[in-house]
Image (cartoon, grey):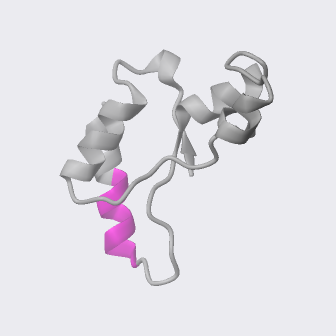
Amino acid sequence: IIHLKLDQLELSRLEIYNSLREKGIGTNVHYIPVHFQPFYRNLGFKQGDYPNSESYYDGALSIPMFSKLNKEDIEFVINALKKSIF
């Protein structure tokens, strides 16, 4: 998981996500705040109730991480991420 400092970037998380996907890198968004889940929304929780978790969620992006990731794969992900951000 990386946390993007979106206030320092010109792109949104979605744009970075799409850019990485276009380069063949599996990326995803995880750790959706619990109060965003339908069960809790039905209990009355809403956006803005937990600004810290929402801020983390807004910038979090999962990048590949698994035991068989080799050095070349890691460098490929890093370079693609750099190209997507800068």
Figure quadrant of the C terminus: top left
Query: x, y (%) of residue 15?
Result: 30, 32
Q: Residue at x 52, y 82 (%)?
A: 67
Image: 27 above or below 8 = below
Q: Residue at x 30, y 59 (%)?
A: 25
Instruction: Check the image and name the residue furthest to the front.
Output: 42
Q: What residue span does the magenta drawing correspond to?
A: 70-78
Q: Is residue 37 visible?
A: no
| 49 horizontally vs 20: left or right | right
Instruction: Check the image and name the residue furthest to the left.
Output: 22
Query: x, y (%) of residue 5?
Result: 53, 27
Q: Residue at x 34, y 46 (%)?
A: 81
| 51 horizontally vs 30: left or right | right
Q: Residue at x 37, y 54 (%)?
A: 78
Pick the front one: 51 or 5: 51
Q: Does residue 72 belong to the magenta stretch?
A: yes
Query: x, y (%) of residue 65?
Result: 50, 68
Query: x, y (%) of residue 40?
Result: 76, 35
Image: 8 above or below 42 = above
